Each structure stands twice: as C-alpha cells, then as structure tokens.
Amino acid sequence: MLSTKRTNLAVLNGVWVFPPRAYCEERTWWPNRVAYTRHQPIEALINVMRRNLDRHFALSVIALQDVIAAEKAGKIIQAYVRLAEADNTMAAQETAQNVLRKLSGTPPIPGRFGEYWWLNADFQPQEAVDPTVLNCPI
C-alpha cells in the first residue's frame, strides 16, 4: 500500500543510500541515480540532476519503471522523482506515480544511456533541445 505521507527531499542526509555509479549504469538508470532509505518502511527516489547547460531534466524510462514496479511489488512504500540542479539542490519533487500519469501518452526519446523523457521543473514533458542551439548567435 502506498503511503499518503510525503517526505521532504530537499536535503538528502544519511538516511538515503545511493548505490555506486556502476550499479546505476548496469541497471540503465544512469545518469539518474536511484536511492532508497535505510529505515523501514522503505522509500525510494530517482535523483534527476540537470547538467549546467540544460534547461530541463532527463528522466530515465527504466528508472521510473523500476521504482514503480518496486512499489507494486510491496518492496517500497513510496517512490519519488527528485529534480536537482547541477549542484544537487532540489528544484522539485513528485511521486513516481504522479510523474507517470503526467507522462501518459508521451513517447520517450532514445538516448545514449537508453530511453528518457525530457521534463521541465513542473514534470511536464518537453521536446529535446541541444543546449548549444540555445547559445547560437544567428
């Protein structure tokens, strides 16, 4: 059963366990990081960090599917998507189920690390834009 409580993800302290990058790459979550809480009931999050030049956030399709599957299997009580700036300060957070609802009918974009959705800070899907185009003087 999903929790109705909402955890504040502004500060990710020692409660959250982040598996190594190699594990995230192996699971096809990278460049997103998936973390879980050390305590019961277990919660999970997908940390989606914006790169310096990007205006939006790239959410891994596999990461979202995996945390939602863990919820449905009862392995975790709640999963979140956390959008973070390049310095890892939180930009926004939402439950994984609500993010999936917002993405309903939006096809993912193929990418170097697997399929992803390009999101704004309101978790709305966006068209992928090459950041170098934003700085083009002509």
Image (cartoon, rainbow, N blue to C red):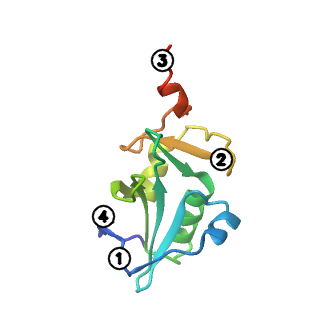
Q: Which residue is mark 4?
A: 10
Q: Secondary structure at mark 3?
A: loop
Q: How many marks?
A: 4
Say which amino acid is labelled 4.
Ala
Q: Position of residue 128 (x, y in %)?
A: 55, 33
Marked residue nearer the N-terminal end (1 or 2)? 1
Q: Position of residue 9 (x, y in %)?
A: 33, 66
Q: Secondary structure at mark 4?
A: loop
Which of discs 3 and 1 lies nearer the camera? The answer is 3
Q: Which residue is mark 2?
A: 115
Say which amino acid is labelled 3.
Pro
Which of discs 3 and 2 lies nearer the camera? The answer is 3
Q: Position of residue 133 (x, y in %)?
A: 53, 26
Q: Secondary structure at mark 2?
A: loop
Q: CA distance from mark 3 to mark 1?
A: 42 Å
Q: How many residues crowd around disc 3 within 10 Å: few (fewer than 14), some, or many (20 or more)?
A: few
Q: Which residue is mark 3?
A: 137
Q: Is residue 46 above or below residue 105?
A: below
Q: Position of residue 87 (x, y in %)?
A: 39, 57
